[in-house]
Image (spheres, rainbow, N blue to C red):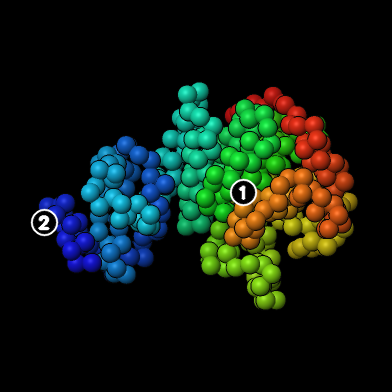
Amino acid sequence: MRSFENQFKNLYDATDKFHIMGKDLDNLVPITMDDIVPNVNLPGDVYFKLSDDNFVVIGREGTREQFKELHFFDKIRNSNIYIRKPDLRKFSSLKVHSANEIMKSDKVPVEAKVNALSHTLNTVFTSIDQLGFSNEALGNTKFIANSVLKIINDTPKLTSLMTLMNSISEDLIKHSMAVSMVSALISQSKGWNNPSILEKMALGALLHDIGLKEYPKEFLSKPRVDYTPEDLEYYQRHSFRGIEILRTVENVPQEVMAIVYEHHENSIGQGYPRGLRDVRLHPFSKVVSLADTFCELTFKDAQKPTPRDPEEAVQFIEHTLGQPFNKECFTALKNILTFGIRKASIKIV
């Protein structure tokens, strides 16, 4: 460790503040290299953790990002790096701006666009977790929702879309984007092609599990079949925690709030948190609750290391679960698999 630390010391003048310690440690938040926009001026200092009370500067605010040129880059590329909490909003905004430029380019392949969006959503979620929800965070998430809609419009096959989503490594991000995608597809299959409806549907689906962002990764990776009653109660609180987070911003659409609160309800009243039946559920919630279960069955993650293919998932929902979801939504999902994606003109705003 000492020789590794000395490698860092040689990078800076003796007059530079090298260590950060004491009260300042509480002001640092972990991010990853994926949260950093390459080859631009850094909007804040970037630190690497040598020990619990020893952090070293590896990038100065205002200097150009060139981490890959560091001879010890391989030692830090897969580790957390740290920035000051007040700088997180600036890093998040820069990431969104970069993703916007990528989405506008016809030369960037769709795989790279999905990759950029997933990293951007992770940065936005981290910002929400650390700084709270805000109008800026709402706007950034709307951008990602509309970008997901554009990818759907540009990619004609469900299997191709699922392959793209499976390339995302972070489980919560992959699931959120996949549910957003499938919810929009179900909406289109039902004939809901109004751009405002699709944006709210995609946005609510992106945010449906925002309450889980605060949960420890160790807990989220624990198989749910191993949950104790206390674990289950703790997990089921995330729906309520989600709307608590969103309530801090006045102009969050009510449709989005309903999705976040009701995405684990079902039409036969056996869901949570309130056990509502179909007639009392918001129409958007009916779509997302089905999309949520479908994506849990079909996308690989810590809970589903061996996922089902889409047809098997639909059969499982219908025959094993007893098809507990809204009938029109389920028919719309089956029609997607049978007849393909209904093309719609989606206005990206």
Q: Position of residue 11 (x, y in %)?
A: 16, 51
Q: Is residue 149 visible?
A: no
Q: Position of residue 184 (x, y in %)?
A: 70, 38
Q: CA distance from mark 2 to mark 1?
A: 46 Å
- Locate residue 90 relative to residue 251 in the image: left or right: left
> Is the Cβ of the residue at disc 2 closer than 8 Å to that at disc 1?
no
Please give the name of the residue rendered at 71% of the width and 51% of the height, measured from the top-left corner: 308
Q: Is residue 171 visible?
A: yes
Residue identified by numbered label 2: 14
Q: Amino acid at mark 2?
A: Ala
Decide: is 144 above or below 233.
above
Please give the name of the residue rendered at 32% of the width and 70% of the height, measured from the top-left corner: 52
Closer to viewer: mark 2 or mark 1: 1
Q: Which mark is residue 74?
A: none
Which of the pair 279/161 is nearer the observer? Answer: 161
Q: Amino acid at mark 1?
A: Ser
- Locate residue 87 relative to residue 250 in the image: left or right: left
